[in-house]
Amino acid sequence: MRLFALFTIFLLLAAAGCSPRYVDVRGEKFEMISESEEKELIEHARLSMKTIARKLPPQDMKVIETQAPEVRFIYAGDRYGRAVVRWQFPRYEAGVDYEGQLMTKYMISTVFTREKLPEVVDFRRRTPRRRALPGKTGR
């Protein structure tokens, strides 16, 4: 009898941990991916970043392997939408952009690196030149 009670409690706790999470988007309720799937997505992003490892400095690859990324989800349906996993560096950002049915074989992933844009671009001259904001010194 005790074994049955422990087994029942274990099943209830497991079911509570696997309950779906929801997000409200403009009055519609969409199912989100679970926390464990989010961790799996981050690990997939880290493995995907290794495909461009030769383009990144080794110390930045260590940051990617050890530090938590910035993760942003935009849902357009149940477990459907866009997810961006990225790491910020002083001169650029790198990451993976996921689109489609998240955490399925139909999910599309794109690895990217982008140079950060300057704070202000001066278009008064023929060729755009970077300039500092008022009150800031330096180049």
Image: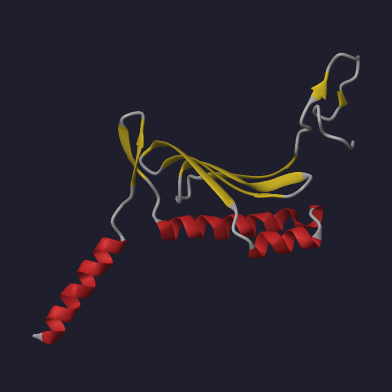
Q: Eyeballing the image, is 72 above or below 26?
A: below
| Residue under the image location 12 percent in, 86 percent down | 2
Q: Is residue 35 or residue 46 the one in the foreground?
A: 35
| Residue under the image location 79 percent in, 54 percent down | 56
Quadrant occupied by the C terminus = top right
| Residue under the image location 81 percent in, 30 percent down | 135
Using the rendered view, name the quadrant where residue 58 is placed. Answer: bottom right
Using the rendered view, name the quadrant where residue 53 is placed. Answer: bottom right
Q: Residue furthest left?
A: 1
Residue 59 in picture, x, y percent from top left: 78, 62
Indicate left or right for 60 with 122 as reference: left
Indicate left or right for 26 with 70 as reference: left
Quadrant occupied by the N terminus = bottom left
Residue 92 in picture, x, y percent from top left: 75, 44
Residue 15 in picture, x, y percent from top left: 25, 63
Q: Residue furthest front?
A: 135
Q: Is residue 72 or residue 33 the one in the foreground?
A: 72
Q: Is residue 54 or residue 23 the one in the foreground?
A: 23
- Image label count: 0
| Coloration of the structure image | secondary structure
Q: Eyeballing the image, is 133 above or below 116?
A: above
